[in-house]
Image (tube, rainbow, N blue to C red):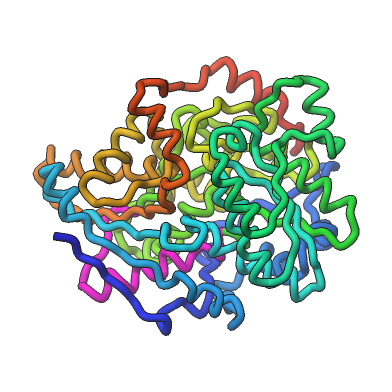
């Protein structure tokens, strides 16, 4: 038995939710190289003004353009399922719901922001975008959106993922994008990294450096980011808004909302709309699940740091492992980032949201159990949310207390089967990042304030 709660096209949200309006304190401002707050004009070389305005907005609701809503209709509203078979397998009194974002053409939640960013760049007369991607979900999503709005896309893909996930690369190329293994020799940032380590496997921070450098040094090229920044988090709130409407349809409401967290947009997308209720006094827990091998929220330092490795971006106050942090090549490539969304970070610092770190083997164990019960093979990133949801459900079983659990199944794993092969063959290992390595990376934080 499986319960599917669906909405109609008319139920696609008409506005994005901006959590800034309901935060107890204003967000910490981004800083320039001199340690002073920067204004919106500092972002003009790489972003269209419409996105910059969203980045600095404190308005609770941001209208979604009709052309973006029309593009979203290709896969939205996404379904919400109740996982009856998984509940039975666990023997838990908890009710488990999951919002399934793998129904998008790119197979993940990432197109929710990609179509918006491509639209605003098209409106600004931009015909070329440079971006980074970890596991490939964002790169393939922007490639898709580029086709929709007539924009050329170049993707700097983290080298370890470029090699691990060749079919993600094929997806991007099918949609017309040019894909490069980062670090490359095409940018000053890439050449600097390769001079220091010719065998570098890359990182999201390095790929961001290359894409930002290209956008900043080429007329007619802008930069698009798949997570972290405020406007990306806003765009993803269609997920949580729809989930609230779907649960209301059946008279239910979650006790806990869970999303995997790398840069933070996936977690923000499902959790932020519930934070408005929490701010109004509703009892709901919001839990970000991250890898134990890249434990930004759980073991990082809350400080100003660069969003990229080389130091081209403004300084953002966030939980960070240090901008030169080099994560291990785990298969959840979308979560291998040294920092987190400034909004997610501030909410965690203020105790409004929670975070858990889960090891790689336990996430694949959870993903396999989920697939065998519910039929959907989840992406390695999504397995982190599944693991956290299973742990919550098992805790309910121990206490003998029912709870309602909602998690975001942010994408399918059809292009990640090599990772499952490695898991079944016993080739995957857990990796808890050494405290000494974290401390060494944190020593290089910018000295500001």
Query: 348 or 62, which lies in front?
Result: 62
The answer to whether residue 449 is above or below residue 329 is below
Give above or below for 449 relative to 115. above
Percent from the top left, x then y, of residue 329?
A: 55, 28
Q: Is residue 290 left or right of residue 142?
A: left
Of 369 and 358, nearer the camera is: 369
Which percent across, then down, holds residue 161? 58, 36
Residue that appears at 59% across and 18% down: 437
Which quadrant: the C terminus? top right
- Quarter location, residue 380: top left
The answer, for residue 346, to whether it is visible in the render is no
Furthest residue in direction top, as rendered: 436
- Which quarter of the rendering shows the N terminus? bottom left
Residues drawn in magenta: 233-257
Question: In this rendering, is residue 407 above or below 54?
Answer: above
**Magenta segment includes 163:** no
Q: Specify whether residue 251 is painted magenta.
A: yes
Point out residue 54 in the picture as x, y percentages from the top left corner: 66, 67
Q: Residue at x 52, y 31 (%)?
A: 294
Left or right side of 355 for 6:
left
Dominant SS of magenta comes to: helix
Q: Is residue 317 visible?
A: yes
């Amino acid at each position: 038995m499986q319960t599917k709660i669906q909405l109609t096209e008319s139920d696609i949200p008409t506005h994005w939710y901006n959590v800034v309006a309901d935060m107890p304190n204003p967000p910490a401002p981004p800083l320039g190289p001199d340690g002073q707050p920067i204004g919106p004009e500092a972002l003009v070389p790489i972003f269209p003004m419409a996105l910059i305005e969203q980045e600095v907005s404190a308005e609770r609701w941001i209208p979604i353009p009709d052309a973006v809503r029309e593009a979203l209709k290709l896969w939205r509203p996404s379904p919400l399922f109740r996982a009856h078979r998984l509940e039975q397998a666990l023997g838990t009194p908890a009710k488990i719901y999951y919002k399934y974002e793998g129904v998008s053409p790119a197979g993940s939640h990432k197109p929710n922001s990609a179509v918006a960013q491509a639209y605003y760049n098209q409106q600004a007369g931009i015909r070329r975008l440079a971006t980074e991607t970890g596991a490939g979900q964002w790169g393939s999503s922007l490639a898709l959106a580029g086709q929709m709005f007539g924009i050329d896309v170049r993707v700097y893909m983290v080298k370890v993922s470029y090699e691990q996930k060749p079919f993600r690369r094929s997806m991007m190329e099918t949609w017309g994008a040019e894909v490069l293994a980062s670090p490359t020799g095409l940018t000053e940032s890439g050449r600097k990294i390769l001079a220091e380590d010719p065998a570098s496997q890359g990182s999201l921070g390095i790929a961001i450096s290359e894409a930002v450098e290209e956008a900043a040094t080429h007329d007619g090229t802008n930069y698009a980011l798949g997570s972290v920044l405020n406007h990306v988090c806003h765009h993803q709130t269609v997920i949580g808004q729809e989930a609230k409407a779907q649960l209301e349809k059946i008279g239910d409401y979650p006790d806990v909302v869970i999303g995997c967290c790398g840069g933070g947009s996936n977690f923000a997308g499902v959790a932020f709309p519930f934070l408005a209720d929490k701010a109004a006094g509703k009892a709901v827990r919001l839990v970000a699940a991250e890898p134990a091998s890249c434990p930004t929220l759980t073991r990082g330092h809350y400080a100003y740091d660069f969003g990229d490795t080389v130091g081209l971006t403004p300084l953002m106050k966030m939980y960070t492992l240090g901008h030169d942090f080099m994560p291990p090549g785990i298969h959840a490539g979308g979560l291998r980032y040294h920092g987190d969304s400034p909004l997610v970070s501030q909410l965690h610092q203020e105790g409004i949201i929670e975070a858990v770190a889960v090891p790689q083997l336990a996430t694949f164990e959870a993903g396999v159990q989920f697939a065998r019960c519910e039929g959907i093979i989840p992406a390695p990133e999504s397995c982190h949310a599944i693991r956290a949801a299973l742990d919550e459900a098992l805790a309910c079983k121990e206490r003998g207390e029912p709870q309602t659990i909602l998690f975001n199944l942010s994408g399918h794993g059809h292009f990640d089967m090599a990772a499952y092969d490695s898991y079944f063959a016993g080739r995957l290992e857990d990796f808890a990042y050494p405290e000494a390595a974290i401390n060494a990376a944190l020593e290089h934080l910018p000295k500001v304030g």
